[in-house]
Image (spheres, rainbow, N blue to C red):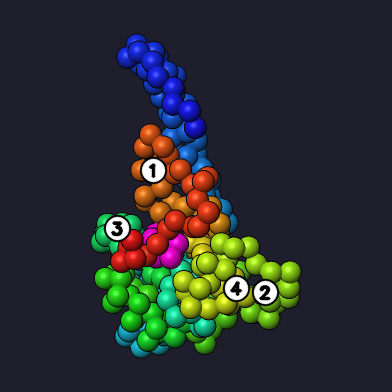
Amino acid sequence: MPVRTGTREEWQAARERLLEREKELTRRNDELARERQELPWVPIEKEYRFETDEGTKTLAELFDGRSQLLVYHFMFGPDYEAGCPVCSSSADTVNGAIPHLNARDLTMVYVSRAPLEKLDAYKRRMGWTFPWVSSHESDFNLDFGVSAPKERIAQMLQAGAPPIVDQLAAECGTDPPGYLSEQQALSAFALEDGVVYHTYSTFARGVEIMMGFYPLLDRAPKGRNESGDRDFWIRRHDEY
């Protein structure tokens, strides 16, 4: 993008116009937050079980004594040897937020389909401390649309996968169908009178809120500057 130069007065005038747009966006974001909270609550009727460091737990037990639960669906399938680099980048920026969320009656856990021992080993490598549980023997990921049978994905990729998928699959130690059998998402749940309710989920770019470095890049002179990258630039923090 060509650089535009100008005087301090021109910058100030342009900045004030932009500030009005930023304020509009802030107000609209506040409205959207209220609309999310007004979505109907859907009771969870199936009994899901997860493998945790403290043994097998139900979905209700993952709340850990609080009334709200956020679940990040981390892309780490049974065939993966390492977690998705994109999910890993977001986990770096969330790890320190957990105590603040807990202080507002909110528990946050990460859920993946890989066996718990794989998750624990990767968690130690990355230096994370947030709760991470395995849904390996559960339908949880399938029922919430964040996992799909590998065979179905393989049929969709008969013509081949995009280069970026080949790259990310290799970085996770799996093949493209194995990689795409998982997707990242964020889901919210409430616990009231012993009943668990699903209240919200977001996918794709809706999960960018977890990637705290993107808003910072958006405010830098060159922004995300991703258009010229032939390879996907995001790496695990110990691989840069």
Q: Nearer the viewer, residue 226 or 67?
A: 226
Dot 3, crowdedness within 10 Å: few (<14), some or many (≥20)? Answer: few
Question: Residue 34: x, y in percent?
Answer: 48, 44
The answer to whether the residues at label 2 and label 3 have Cβ atoms under 8 Å apart is no
Residue type highlighted by circle 1: Leu
Q: Are marks 4 and 1 in contact (CB under 8 Å)?
A: no
Residue type, numbered disc 4: Pro
Classify 10 Å Cα crowding around label 1: few (below 14), some (14-19), many (20 and above).
few
Identified by mark 3, the residue type is: Ala
**What secondary structure prevails in the magenta region?**
helix
On the image, numbered disc 1 is attached to which residue? 217
Q: Which residues are magenta?
A: 85-90
Would you say the residues marked 1 and 3 are in contact, meaning their CB atoms lie under 8 Å apart? Answer: no
Q: Which residue is mark 2?
A: 153
Q: Which amino acid, mark 2?
A: Ile
**1 vs 3, front mark:** 1
At a point 73% along the width and 73% down the height, the residue shown is 158
Residue under the image location 62 percent in, 75 percent down: 177
| Whether residue 45 can be seen here | no
- Residue 12, compared with residue 99, is above or below; it is above
Report helix, strand or loop for mark 3. Answer: helix
| Nearest to N terminus: mark 1 or mark 3 | 3
| Sequence order check, earlier mark of 1 and 2 | 2
* Secondary structure of the residue carrying numbered label 4: helix
> Which of the marked residues, 2 or 4, is nearer the chain's N terminus?
2
* Badge number at residue 176: 4
Marks 2,4: beta carbons within 8 A = yes
Position of 175 with respect to 220 (left or right) is: right
Q: Residue at x 51, y 83 (%)?
A: 78
Tell me the mark number nearer the camera, choosing from 3 and 4: 4
